[in-house]
Each structure stands twice: as structure tokens, then as C-alpha cells.
Image (tube, grey):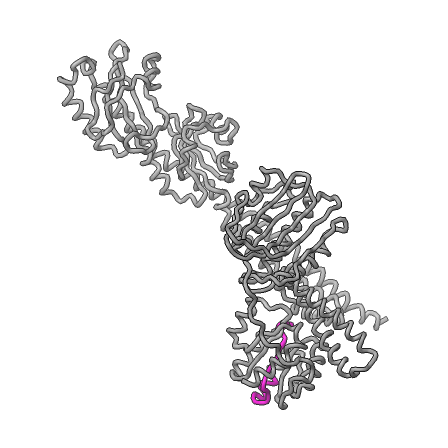
């Protein structure tokens, strides 16, 4: 019983500790969530206070401007006698009134001019600072109101663009009435609203904030906005807008949250009514701008807490697992670290297959040499070699589509590119689609980028398949020479004098009418249903063909199918380089030089050991990069060359190269990889790597590469 209790006590202690950790995690998570939510609420409240304070400040300035303007207009209305508006009144009152208008205008920066007009709307007196030509104001809305309504007093016009200043302008007016209340003219004061825009712009309202001045007496019509959007001026506010609803309750101030009906930006606003005047000011801050700092804080807090949770989770797993399970977890972690993302799924698959194929091809070659030329197993080994070679070629095709690399035009035959693409398409297209390929036997060379040409064919054949609309049909790919003795022109299609490769894709699908054909190369144009096409396929094709200095033509008839013709300029093939010396095991003999080989794949390690030993080299093998570097550090002069795999867990081939360069800079290093990207090549050059080798070509290239480097 004592023994049983002793066994269970550690278990109970672990369970109790686990419960404490879980409770702590839940409690801390709840607390962090509450604190973050509180910080968010505080940020929004602070934004509300800021917006309202800004609106109050602007309201004070606007109120002062309107009151000063009203005072001037009121004083002029009282000081302008009826006789001044009589015919020839300027002779008696002109100097005095114009001087008074000038004096009043000079003390008022926001005011553009001061004008006195008579009962017929004719301008009689004006401040000398005004450069606006004389005009008749009888057709203005305020004039009609003054004539029809004897109680009409201070009025504000809609916003207009100044004739001379080209700035937003609003006219404030007061009527001139005699003792009996008869209308005999009006005094006008146009205000330059850009003065207020400058005040609006001085506020710190963030990237997406806005300031609005609207009218209460005209359904919330916009008078002024910052940032300025001319199309919104004089436009009313929606009747169900939260700000408008608040104003209908006679509130002088309000704080609102809403999504702007003009630009869709969520905003937090403070609104203040301008006392005594039919206007209200709104300062609106973007909720996204307000919460930016909070989001950064929340993200940092969540990431930090997530890291702590992960650590706690790891600790709990360690408490729950035995030593054996713990070692298994560590092994899985090391294995997961060994798998490196190489940009695309195709590249990753290709890398793994290349490792396998390198081992298969190398061991098959060694096995064939071991059993001798007349052994019955030679036929089976040859079939394995052929199948593995085909698999390696297929992987290279997949890799060509999956990797990201700079495009370069290279002199190369087109037939292999077409054949490789057809081979890929056969496994893609459904059985109901008959794929046929007609290639001319005569080699046709062009300056071409292999990946782009294959992309063109894939796009065209995919479109051809879709044109069949699920029915049985045929897709035909052809390649033939095409010579133009004189300039050929046909339906807008033009070819200059020269020799071309004519590549075409034909389908027996639904075809296209003339209107569709006219737009097929436009970006984003598609005839496919929503969500089934981007409209970029043929646009990309057109761009690639143009980059290859070629021409594209489309023949299509509704119901009879479509043929897309590509014409690429051909070039003479480059001279054939002499074949490399034999690459079979034992063909390239060394002189006992010491090669250090590093690879975490034991199959590859054993294969390379036999390959190099048969080639006349001494070999030291390591499955760990750090151990290899330690060996070089212990005996720097013991090795003549290092060959290392690139993709190894924990300590990559690039790490090995850098470490060796620090220990012995003159020791050549070769990196082997199943996927050679541009990034890998750049880092290899920077690390002083002598060469980068395709791992799947180890059998054919390693011995020759080792001898070539050691000979320099």
C-alpha cells in the first residue's frame, strides 16, 4: 500500500500542478481580455472627448466670425439712408459710404468685400478691395425673400465658387428697410470659406478624419468640409443619420459613432451647434485611426501572451508525457525544423523526390557495375534506371512551374517544351478530352523562356478545355515552321519578313463571336461565370508573346471552335558543345584527395561514398553539419574539398560553408540541393561557395565536378 501511494503521489502532484496552470492560464487570459477591452473603450472615449473639444473650439471661432459679420451688416443697414439708394445718390453719399466699406473690410480677414445694392438689385456701393465686376443681384434667392417677406432679416446663401478667387464663398446679407418697413436695398458680405478650411486643416484629426460645417435650416446641407470634396458641397445629410437625429432633439452638443455615408469610413464624431446661427460643426475622427495604437498594443499583448501560453502548454505536455514520449516530441520537432518552405508546394515536392531519385539512380548505377555486364539482373536494373530518369524529368517539369525565378530568353528548341507541357496536360485533362499533338520533325529554335512558353500553352489549353463546357471534344496542339517572304497582313494581323515558329492550339468547343474576340486580351475580361475566371489568362498570354517579339492571332466561329495562333521568330541553333567525358562510376579517377561529404540522408551518404571511392578519392562521411565543421576545426589541412547537402535540419549546408570559410578560406565547398533557387545562388556566392550542384544529378555530375574543382 505504501508502494502504491508512493507511485501515485507524483502523479497527483503533476495533476494538481496541471490544474493550477490551466486555471492560471484561463484567469490570466480573461484578465488580459478585460484590460484590452477597457483600453479600447478608453481610447474611444478619449476620441469622443477630443472630437467634441475640437468642435467646441471651432464653434467659438465661427460664432465670433458670424457675430462680427452680423454686427457690421447691422451697422451698415442702420447707417445707410434711403436717399443713398435714390438715383444719383452716389454723388452725395459715394465717398462716405465707400470709405466706410473700405474701413470695415480692412479689419476683417475672412471677408472678401462689402456691397450695397438698391431695391432693383443694382450694386451702388462697394469696397475698393473688391475686384468683382458690377452685377445685378435681383435674381438671387435672398433678394426674392426680402421682397416677399418683410420679416426676413439675416440670410446665408448656398456655397458658391468665387468668380475671381475661385475659392468657396458664402454670402451673408441683411435687408435695408425704411421706417415704414419698405425694402429699399440690401447689404452683402461674401465670406471666404477657405479661411475656415485653414483652421480645420490645423487640427490633428488623423489620416481619415474629417471636419464638416452644415446648415440646420436646410436638411443638413454641407457648407464646408475638410479634406475638401467639392461634389459634397450643398448636399443634404441623410434623414436617418445619427448626427441629424440627435439635432432633432434640440441638443446643442452630441457625440456619435457611425459609418460615413459618403466614403464608408467608420467615424467617432463630436457635434456642436453654432449658437444663434443655423449651422452646426462636426469633427469626425476615423475609428480605425483611433484604434491603431490600441490594435498594436492588443497584437503585442496577444503575441506575448500566446508565447507564454505556448510555453505553458509545452510545460504541461512535458509533465504529462514520459521520457520516451518527450524524446519522440523532440525528434518530431527536429524533423519539422528540417523541412524548409521553398516558396511553393511544387518546389517542396520536387526537392523531396529529387533526394529519393538521386539515391535510386546512384545505387542502380553502382549495382549494375557490381553485377557485371552479362548478369541477368542488368535488364531489371536498366528498367529501374529508365523509370527513375523519367521520374526525374517529370519532377523537373513540376519544379519549372512551381519555382519563382527571373525570366530569361535562351536559344533553345521548342519541340521539347511543347512535349513536356503535353505530358503534364495529359494527367490534368479529363478522359473526355482528346489531347493530340502534332510536332514537325525539323528542330525549331527560338529565343524563349521555357517556363513562360509552357505557361502560355497551359493557359491556352485550359481555356480550350473550358470551351468544351464539359462535353467530349478535342484539343489539338501543333508546331510547324512559317516563312514570310513579303509582309503578310490579314484582318489586322501583321507579320514582317522573316522565319517563324507557328505554334497553335485548337479546340472543338463553343467558339466566340466577333464582339468577344475583340476583347479577349483585355485584362479582367472573362466570359466565365462569377467566381470561375479572373480574365487574366489571355492577357498574360498576350504579354508573354509580345515579350518574345512574337504575334498572336485568333480564329473563332460560334459553334465551330477556336484556334489560337502564335508566331515566334526563330533563330539558328547554337553550336553543339563537345560531349563531356564519361560520367559512369570509375570514369573520372582522382589521386587520393580527401573529400568530406555531409548529408543527413544515409542512403545518399552510402551511395556517394562508393561513388567517390571508386573514383579514387578518400571520403569522410558526416550526417550532421556541426560534426563536419568540428572535424575541419580539429584538422583544417586534412581535407581537400567539402561537398554538403543544403537542406539539413538545424545546421544547413550554407551554415557549413560559412563556418568552413571562417576556419579555412581556401578550402573549396560545393553545395548540393534538389531545388536551386535564385536566393540560394546569391547566398552561395556571398558565402564563397565554389559551385552549386543539382542533387538529382549526383551520379552524372559529382565525380566530374570534384575533379574539375580539385584541378584548379
Instruction: Report if residue 650 lies within the magenta region.
Output: yes
For residue 98, above or below residue 40: above
Q: Whole-percent x and y of residue 453?
A: 60, 57
User: Could you tell whether 336 is left or right of 158 in the image?
Assistant: right
Closest to the observer: 504 or 297? 504
| Quadrant position of the C terminus in the picture | bottom right
Closest to the observer: 333 or 440? 440
User: Could you tell whether 684 is left or right of 506 in the image?
Assistant: left
Q: Is residue 321 visible?
A: yes
Tell me what residue is drawn at x 26 percent, y 22 percent: 135
Q: Whole-percent x and y of residue 257?
A: 51, 37
Which quadrant holds residue 554? top right
| Range shown magenta | 630-651
Tell me what residue is drawn at x 77 percent, y 74 percent: 382
Q: Whole-percent x and y of residue 640?
A: 58, 86
Q: Is residue 651 visible?
A: no
For residue 413, above or below residue 68: below
Tell me what residue is drawn at x 55 percent, y 67 percent: 679
Which residue is outermost to the right? 1
User: Could you tell whether 605 is left or right of 88 in the image?
Assistant: right
Q: How many marks can you see?
A: 0
Closest to the observer: 90 or 181? 90
Tell me what residue is drawn at x 66 percent, y 77 percent: 700
Q: Whole-percent x and y of residue 291?
A: 51, 47
User: Could you tell whether 608 is left or right of 660 in the image?
Assistant: right
Instruction: Report if residue 246 lies within the magenta region.
Output: no
| Quadrant position of the N terminus in the picture | bottom right
Closest to the observer: 637 or 26? 637
Amino acid at each position: 500500500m505504501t508502494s502504491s501511494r508512493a507511485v501515485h503521489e507524483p502523479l497527483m502532484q503533476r495533476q494538481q500542478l496541471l490544474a493550477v496552470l490551466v486555471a492560471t492560464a484561463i484567469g490570466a487570459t480573461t484578465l488580459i481580455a478585460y484590460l484590452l477591452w477597457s483600453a479600447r473603450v478608453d481610447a474611444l472615449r478619449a476620441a469622443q472627448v477630443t472630437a467634441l473639444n475640437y468642435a467646441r473650439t471651432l464653434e467659438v471661432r465661427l460664432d465670433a466670425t458670424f457675430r462680427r459679420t452680423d454686427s457690421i451688416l447691422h451697422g451698415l443697414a442702420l447707417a445707410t439712408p434711403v436717399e443713398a439708394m435714390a438715383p444719383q445718390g452716389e454723388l452725395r453719399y459715394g465717398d462716405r459710404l465707400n470709405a466706410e466699406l473700405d474701413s470695415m473690410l480692412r479689419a476683417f480677414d475672412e471677408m472678401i468685400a462689402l456691397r450695397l445694392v438698391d431695391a432693383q438689385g443694382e450694386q451702388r456701393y462697394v469696397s475698393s478691395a473688391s475686384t468683382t465686376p458690377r452685377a445685378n443681384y435681383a435674381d438671387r434667392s435672398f433678394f426674392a425673400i426680402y421682397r416677399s417677406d418683410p420679416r426676413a432679416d439675416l440670410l446665408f446663401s448656398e456655397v458658391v465658387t468665387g468668380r475671381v478667387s475661385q475659392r468657396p464663398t458664402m454670402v451673408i446679407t441683411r435687408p435695408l428697410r425704411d421706417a415704414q418697413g419698405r425694402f429699399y436695398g440690401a447689404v452683402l458680405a461674401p465670406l471666404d470659406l477657405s479661411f475656415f478650411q485653414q483652421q480645420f486643416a490645423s487640427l490633428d484629426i488623423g489620416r481619415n478624419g474629417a471636419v464638416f460645417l452644415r446648415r440646420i435650416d436646410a436638411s443638413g446641407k454641407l457648407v464646408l468640409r475638410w479634406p475638401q470634396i467639392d461634389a459634397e458641397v450643398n448636399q443634404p445629410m441623410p434623414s436617418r443619420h445619427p448626427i441629424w437625429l440627435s439635432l432633432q432633439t434640440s441638443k446643442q452638443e452630441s457625440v456619435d459613432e457611425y459609418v460615413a455615408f459618403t466614403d464608408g469610413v467608420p467615424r467617432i464624431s463630436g457635434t456642436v451647434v453654432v449658437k444663434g446661427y443655423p449651422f452646426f460643426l462636426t469633427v469626425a475622427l476615423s475609428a480605425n485611426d483611433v484604434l491603431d495604437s490600441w490594435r498594436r498594443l492588443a497584437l503585442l499583448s496577444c503575441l506575448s501572451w500566446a508565447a507564454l501560453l505556448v510555453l505553458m502548454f509545452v510545460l504541461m505536455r512535458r509533465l504529462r508525457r514520459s521520457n520516451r514520449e518527450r524524446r519522440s516530441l523532440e525528434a518530431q520537432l527536429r524533423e519539422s525544423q528540417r523541412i524548409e518552405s521553398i516558396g511553393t508546394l511544387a518546389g517542396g515536392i520536387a526537392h523531396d523526390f529529387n533526394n529519393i531519385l538521386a539515391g535510386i539512380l546512384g545505387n542502380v548505377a553502382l549495382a549494375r557495375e557490381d553485377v557485371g555486364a552479362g548478369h541477368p539482373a542488368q535488364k531489371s536494373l536498366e528498367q529501374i534506371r529508365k523509370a527513375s530518369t523519367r521520374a526525374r524529368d517529370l519532377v523537373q517539369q513540376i519544379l519549372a512551374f512551381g519555382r519563382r525565378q527571373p525570366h530569361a530568353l535562351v536559344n533553345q528548341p521548342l519541340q521539347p517544351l511543347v512535349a513536356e507541357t503535353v505530358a503534364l496536360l495529359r494527367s490534368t485533362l479529363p478522359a473526355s478530352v482528346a489531347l493530340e499533338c502534332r510536332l514537325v520533325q525539323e528542330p525549331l529554335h527560338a529565343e524563349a523562356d521555357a517556363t513562360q512558353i509552357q505557361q502560355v500553352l497551359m493557359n491556352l489549353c485550359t481555356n480550350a478545355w473550358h470551351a468544351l463546357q464539359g462535353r467530349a471534344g478535342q484539343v489539338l496542339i501543333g508546331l510547324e515552321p512559317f516563312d514570310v517572304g513579303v509582309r503578310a497582313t490579314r484582318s489586322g494581323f501583321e507579320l514582317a519578313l522573316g522565319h517563324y515558329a507557328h505554334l497553335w492550339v485548337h479546340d472543338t468547343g463553343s467558339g466566340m463571336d466577333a464582339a468577344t474576340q475583340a476583347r479577349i486580351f483585355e485584362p479582367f475580361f472573362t466570359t466565365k461565370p462569377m467566381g470561375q475566371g479572373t480574365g487574366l489568362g489571355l492577357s498574360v498570354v498576350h504579354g508573354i508573346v509580345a515579350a518574345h517579339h512574337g504575334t498572336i492571332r485568333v480564329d473563332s466561329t460560334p459553334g465551330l471552335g477556336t484556334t489560337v495562333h502564335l508566331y515566334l521568330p526563330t533563330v539558328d541553333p547554337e553550336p553543339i558543345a563537345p560531349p563531356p567525358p564519361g560520367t559512369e562510376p570509375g570514369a573520372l579517377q582522382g589521386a587520393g584527395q580527401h573529400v568530406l561529404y555531409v548529408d543527413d540522408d544515409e542512403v545518399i551518404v552510402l551511395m556517394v561514398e562508393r561513388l567517390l571511392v571508386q573514383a579514387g578519392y578518400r571520403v569522410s562521411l558526416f550526417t550532421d553539419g556541426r560534426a563536419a565543421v568540428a572535424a575541419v576545426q580539429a584538422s583544417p589541412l586534412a581535407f581537400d574539398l567539402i561537398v554538403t547537402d543544403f537542406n539539413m535540419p538545424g545546421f544547413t549546408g550554407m551554415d557549413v560553408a560559412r563556418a568552413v570559410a571562417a576556419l579555412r578560406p581556401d578550402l573549396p565547398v560545393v553545395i548540393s540541393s534538389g531545388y536551386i533557387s535564385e536566393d540560394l545562388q546569391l547566398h552561395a556566392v556571398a558565402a564563397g561557395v565554389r559551385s552549386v550542384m543539382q542533387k538529382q544529378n549526383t551520379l552524372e555530375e559529382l565525380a566530374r565536378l570534384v575533379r574539375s574543382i580539385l584541378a584548379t
